[in-house]
Amino acid sequence: MNHMFKNKIRGFARSLKLQYIKLLRSPGGARKVATGFAIGFGLEMLVLSTAMVVYVFLYPIVRIMRGSLSAAIIGNLICKATFLPVLMLPVAMEVGRFLTPFKPHGIPRTVFYYLHTLLGMSLFAGVFGFLSFFPVYYLYEARRKHRENKRREKRQLCPMEEKHPNVNPQTVDGE
């Protein structure tokens, strides 16, 4: 039983590594990954205000904006792990109250408080989504340059393999 558990954990770790490599090698590059992350991060800010209805719109928004869905899910999970949406709820209600100068007439107070919160969280979602784009873009580019330098150094150390990748260097010189 213990052996099966270790295999499942090892398989899960391998699948995470595969998804990470696929994310780094995505054809759109840094812009696609950073856009997906920003969308996921921003939409997570709206989850509590919309009673999780926003998850229905995650996939279409990511496709319309040409972002990476896996990066959007990662951004969503990171925002969820920080508890930022929960911490920002009271602030969002105050921001929403500030942005709507009129008082409700005939609308129940709880509905109007909900609208305040939704307006404030929408504003925070846009701001935090926009701000999360730049660090992810920078980190993606830094990782890409690091991998490129590593490959270049490896090619400089082994020039024979670059010219003849399937030939053993000892048999070429010593025949």
Image (spheres, grey):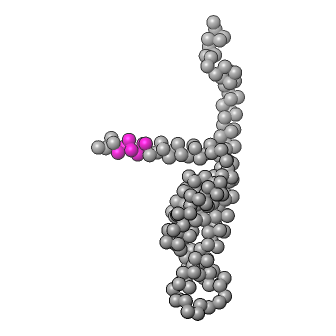
Can residue 139 be seen by looking at this rendering? no
Res 147 quadrant in image: top right
In front of the other: 153 or 103 = 103
Q: Is residue 72 shown above or below 167?
A: below
What residue occupies the far top of the structure in this picture?
Answer: 175
Residue depicted at 52% across the width and 42% down the height: 18
* Picture layout, residue 106 above or below residue 77: below
Is any part of residue 159 visible from this angle?
yes
Name the one closer to the observer, 103 or 148: 103
Query: Does 158 sit left or right of 113 as displayed?
Result: right
Instruction: Look at the image and tell me in which quarter the C terminus lies.
Output: top right
The quarter of the picture where the N terminus appears is top left
Expressed as whole percent of the image width and height from the top left, the position of residue 117 reads 57, 79
- Percent across and percent down for residue 68 are 61, 52
Question: Where does the image place residue 154, in percent across and percent down from the top left?
Answer: 66, 31
Q: Nearer the viewer, residue 42 or 61?
A: 61
Residue at figure coordinates x 47%, y 42% from the top left: 14
Secondary structure that dominates the magenta span: helix
Snapshot quadrant of residue 25: top right
Q: Is residue 125 magenta?
A: no
Picture residue at 55% right of the left edge, 92% below the top: 106
Residue at the left extreme, as displayed: 1
Query: What residue span does the magenta drawing correspond to?
Result: 5-11
